[in-house]
Image: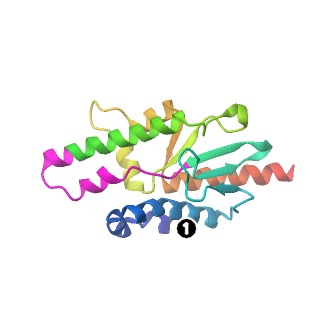
Amino acid sequence: GIDGLADTTSKLSRILDSSQARGHWGERMVKDILAHLGLKKGINFETQSGSKEGKPDFTFFLPQGKRLNMDVKFPWVHYANLFSVNGEPEKETERKSFLKDVKGHVKTLSKRDYIDPADGTLDFVLMFIPNEGIYAFLNKPETGEENLVEFAMDNKVLLCSPITLFAILAMVRQSVQSFHLE
């Protein structure tokens, strides 16, 4: 359950070394969460194979024909560099670059048609942050710095960690079950 999801830090350093592994890491975590909740591909959600640019990685099906899109591509590079550079000025540079990358990714997502209420989507998109530590890091800006979670919300992008996603999808499953019972 949640313990397994939270216990990811030891694997993280190995994964941060390989960009391809990093790409699959988020996707695999999401698939584990979906499997744990008993959500089925083709019934509760759909995935984009090979995640074509401009297509959401996951689309969740909600009652009354509504959909919720999610992106799992995550700008890892500068976050990974935080652990490999020495010296405070270097770390500060990587930290700022990482935050800039996340902000840029949020802007990209908000411009795509992942959010199209006229076409049945909810009026926000999920951006998966594949690690609780990174999520906490984004939630606690330095003094005078923009809160990226709020910035994302203002752009209709909901940042979610594994535990947050687990909670959101548990609610999705519940709403689908309630809807079918009626």
Q: Which residue is drawn at 72% across and 35% down?
A: 119
What amino acid type should be assigned to the residue bearing mark 1?
Gly
**Residue 86 found in image quarter:** bottom left
Q: Does the magenta stretch include residue 3?
A: no
- Tell me residue 128's x, y (percent): 50, 51
Q: Residue at x 70, y 55 (%)?
A: 173
Viewport quadrant of the N terminus: bottom right
Q: Residue at x 51, y 56 (%)?
A: 163
Foreground: 56 or 168?
Answer: 56
Mark 1 element type: loop
- Tell me residue 30's x, y (percent): 55, 60
- Tell me residue 6's x, y (percent): 45, 63
Q: Label 1: which residue?
A: 1
Span colored in magenta: 71-92
Foreground: 79 or 21?
Answer: 21
| Residue 153 drawn above or below residue 130 | above
What number of labels is visible? 1
- Position of 140 with respect to 164 (left or right) is left
- Tell me residue 84's x, y (percent): 21, 59
